[in-house]
Image (cartoon, rainbow, N blue to C red):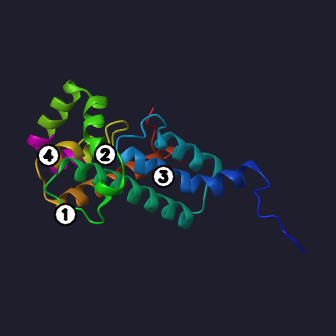
Amino acid sequence: MITSVLPTSWTELVVSAGVPLFVMLFYFDGMMLGKFTPPGALFFGYVVVVDPPLLVLSTVVGLCVAASTLGQWTLYRGFNEDRPELIGIRRRMPYLNRLPFFIRRKVGKRWMRFVTRAFDRFGGLALCLTNAVPGMGGLMSIPAGLSKYPLARFLVFATVGNVFYMLLLVAAAKGLVDLF
């Protein structure tokens, strides 16, 4: 007997395609490239519509946090030229060295001044808190990379901020917190 591996309902389609899509979107969001499709809103919808069990939800949250932190780390490395390359990615990927300039232009001078001042004043705490603000996550990676902020501290603060953001999204989707 042959069984179909294709999803039979919209919910199954969202469940099967949604998680890899979220991971990819949160990675691009961490790099400040995913702002055209807010992954937080899509994730919120996923939690409301699918209502996954706690183990599945925890796994998806963990993957999204890791992807967002990895995206921020990619941006941090792009602005921190003293960091050694791990696998020669700057040489292998065309135009990757232009990414920091594209991000700066996209963000604008006024926002960059604000972000830089906030990072200079509050450091890792600013990085952590802005990750929990929709549309701001990832911005602090730029001054952190430029100031050669220690990598371990950067990763800790970025991860904690991303966990906090994801927990806020889950709490709002479950009706535990009223964000609006």
Residue 92 lies in the magenta-colored region: no
Across the whole image, how many numbered discs are drawn on residues?
4
Kindly report the distance in space between the C-alpha atoms of the residues bearing marks 2 and 1: 17 Å
Q: Judge from the rendering whether residue 22 lies leftward or rightward of residue 98; answer left or right.
A: right
Element marked by disc 3: helix
Where is mark 1, residue-wise? 152
Give the mark nearest the N terminus, 4 or 3: 3
The answer to the question of whether label 2 and label 1 lie on touching residues, with beta carbons closer than 8 A, is no
Q: Position of residue 16 (x, y in %)?
A: 65, 58
Q: Of the numbered discs in the image, which one, if any, rests on residue 146?
A: 4
Q: Amino acid at mark 1?
A: Ala
Q: Amino acid at mark 4?
A: Leu
Q: Position of residue 110 (x, y in %)?
A: 20, 24
Where is mark 2, residue-wise? 131
Give the residue furthest to the bottom. Answer: 1
Q: Quadrant of residue 64?
A: bottom left
Query: Residue at image x 20%, y 26%?
Result: 109
Q: Amino acid at mark 2?
A: Asn
Kindly report the distance in space between the C-alpha atoms of the residues bearing marks 2 and 4: 18 Å
Where is mark 3, residue-wise? 24
Element marked by disc 2: helix
Give the mark nearest the N terminus, 1 or 4: 4
Give the mark nearest the N terminus, 2 or 4: 2
Give the mark nearest the N terminus, 2 or 1: 2
